[in-house]
Amino acid sequence: MFRHGRAVADLHRAETHPDDVVAIISGADLDTTAARQLRRLHSLAEQLADADESAVLPLTVSSLSSALSTDRLAIYLVDQPDSADLTDVAPTAEVVDSATRLLRRSASLHLPVSLASELRLLPLDATSFVGQAAVTSSLVVAPRLDERAGDRVAEVASAHGLAGAWAAPIVGQEGTLAVMVGFHIGQSPLQDDQIRLLELFSTMAGSAIDRGRLVERLRRRNSALEGLRGVLEKLAGPDLLTSGFVSAVDALCGGVGSDMAVLYVDHDHDPNRASSTANDGRPGGWAARAVSTGLVVGGATEQQLRRSIERDRVIGNSAVGAQTTVVAAEFEWSRGRAALVCGWLAGAGNPSVPFDADALVADAANSFRLAMEREVALEVERASAVAQHNRELERALTLRLGHELRTPLTAIRGFASTLLQPDVTWPDDEQQRFLQIIEREAGRMARLVAELFDETAIESGALRLEPNYCDLVAILVEAASIAAPAGAVILDLPDACNVWGDRDRLEQVFVNLIANAVRHNDDDITVRISTEWPLAGDGAPATDLMVVRVEDDGVGMPASALEYLNGQRLDRPNDEGLGLRLIKGLVEAHRGTVRAAVDDGTTVLVTLPIDGGLDPTGDRPV
Amino acid sequence: MAPSTPSANRAEIARVLVVEDDPNIVDLIRSNLLIRGYEVEVSVSGDGVPDLVESYDPAIVLLDLMLPGADGFEICREIRSRSSVGVIVISSRSSEPDKVRALNLGADDYLTKPFGVDELLARMTATLRRSRAVEPAGELSAIQLGGLHIDLERQAVFRDDERVQLTPTEYSLLQVLAINEGRLLSYEELLREVWGRGYENSREYVRVYVGRLRSKLEGPEGPALIVTEPRAGYRLVAPY
């Protein structure tokens, strides 16, 4: 640098402040106070950057004090009042409202104690020079405090013998964060270089406070993740995969501040499922129950994400898409692979991705893995409970079957051996009667055994229907003639139409229903059979279903049989013969339903789909 | 009511109570018993059966275990708590636990459906034989074993001078063991002596009835009266 043709200084561009240039040109010594303070300030900035958050404010105050050679300083943070504050600031009515924000003295240096405590809270408005600085986000200089009538801060400070003051706002990303206030005894207004220093300082302090708040957010986020882990570890309800994981993924999203979070589950390494996932764009298998939240606007990102997961099979720690930052953690669990993916949309106003996002997501993935393994364990436990229950039902069934088969067999064997006894000669009519019982009971046994086979076929899936369009009227007439004596059944079938079904099997259903009514009631029983169209949801008759109503005026079906037919109990009730299970099984094989009620006698409603129920090829196992 | 004592009168026309709900089986049993001179009463449900046993005073009850709305085991227990009548359970449950449970509750015998008439008649005869007079044991009129007194003539058992109520089957078993005091009796010997022909493979009858005798005669703290010889049989030892 030259002045009047003479080299006066040797400067590095990067290290030179414009003030230095001005000073040199005006002939001042380069090492001015301002320059010294500027250098201090640079070192202070470095200190602030490394400082622990709790030390930021006191450090700022003491650095500011030394940098500005001002020894009476305070920093006020913009804050919400709490209940204890309201009484403190009672004289100033403006801050009594809890919604109002105020200025809270957070650090001070060399202020008289009484002054500091009196000015602990200040209203955030223009009634004081401090509030004014906060509201306007600009420096306010008050060289003569005694001239600021009505300004409470000025009055209090003046009463403590202070002559002048200034208030400099600290402005962060969200507006004014705090106000720095300096007091001086003499009336020495701020110099230009001091003002610039203050501006610099406030910028620096603003970023320091912003940084402190960011750290705090991060800390909260971590604790949210901790909470999430706890939630996940405890999540072990029966519907974990549906609702439990949704809320857990939601919590994760909130915890890491991401815009989306997806849990992908690839079930059992099933390649077919994986490929179907790729084709229809919907996750398959367990992945169908994968949950996502806050899905990316535009959709493409999730799509891309899924494709990359499926194509590459392995996800790196993180990947950056065109619009989104994605962090994914893949993990193995006992049923295959899974991946937990979080995405952050790029764009203004979005908080940046946490610096430790990889670790956070990996941690969350581990929690999900634990929860999923727990789910598997529970599933196994439930399955074994179901199996145990089935075994018990099976045992009870075997016992009853034994009883039902042994009863006619006892009659057959008993009467046969009766006729064979050498010590008794039976009259002819008695012999005839015994033989008739043997004949009848043998028929009953044959029927029981046949029904047992049919039931087993239904339950094992081996029963095949041979459906065709069949005449419901013909079926009902035939069934009535087989199962009941002439005149016992009244048929009222104006609505009956053809239905698509297995003629013989449908006949079997109605033969059993009618026979049950006849067998369990007196001889004068009347069974009335009618057909009707059921009412659909809108009150109009449904055209795809046909209801056959079988009513009798007998004693009524036992409650256990009703419950079984209505699906309220799984085990077959102890009825005479095996009819109920067969009736229910065959109707359900036709995709129909059975409902029964007892009022004056028994009413059974058999609802059959007219044509939709069965595969037209007729070749489908039931 | 005191346990009914077998009487010569009842031996001539034995009354039988049939508790069974299946009409064909009732028909079968009634036809066969009536033609052989038994008197038959039928109950198609379990309701009031113990009362009926008291009022009708049958020699034998044929009891179906699976009755509508009643637990056959419970009926068996109730009958036995009030009477020493011979009880033959007729059941379609053929499992060993069911059989042992019925015997434990006091049934004298257990017949599984389906059965032949000859089998039914044989079991009834055996049960009736036990409830009639047991063969007098030679010259003996009484046996004294420590505090246990068996009056062979009156077929009564006293423990420390107190009458112990035994069913006919229990008494028969005790008498056989007591007469052969100190001697090991095999399952087969006991079955043949007490139950008769056709029971050779029913060791559980012996086990159950020895258990019933022990519970009635030994008391919780008392010395063993009937000693088990594992896999061989039982022996009665006189308490000192």
Image (cartoon, coloured by chain):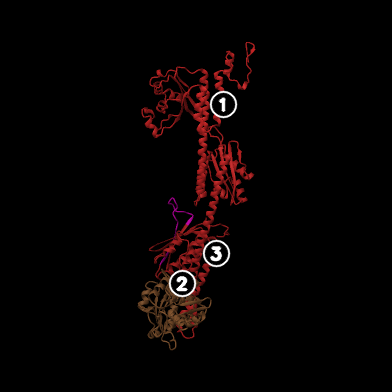
Chain colours: A red, B brown
Residue underneath mark 1? A43
Task: State which region is magenta.
Answer: A526-545
Give the Cα separation between the discs numbered 1 and 3: 89 Å
Tell whether B40 sits left or right of A321. Answer: left
Which percent across, then down, holds residue A61?
A: 49, 27
**Badge nearest the viewer, 3 or 2:** 2
Image height of A2 relative to A329, above or below:
above
Which percent across, then down, holds residue A9?
A: 63, 16
Outermost residue on the front side: it is B240
| Subunit ID for the residue under disc 1 | A
Q: Count residues near mark 3 (Cα–Cα under 10 Å), then give few for <14, some for 14-19, many for 20+.
A: some
Query: Can residue B194 be found in the magenta stretch?
Result: no
In which quadrant of the rendered view does residue B51 lie? bottom left
Q: Is mark 3 on a helix, strand or loop?
A: helix
Q: Which residue is drawn at 60% across and 20% down?
A: A16
Depth check: A242 or A127 in front?
A127
The N terminus of chain B: image quadrant: bottom left
Q: Is mark 2 on a helix, strand or loop?
A: helix
| Magenta region, main secondary structure | loop
Depth check: B150 or A134 in front?
B150
Residue underneath mark 3? A457
Q: Which of marks 1 and 3 is nearer the N terminus?
A: 1
**Badge nearest the viewer, 1 or 3:** 1
Residue underneath mark 2? B101
Which percent across, then down, holds residue A45?
A: 55, 27
Q: Which residue type does callout 2 highlight?
A: Arg
**Badge nearest the viewer, 2 or 1:** 1
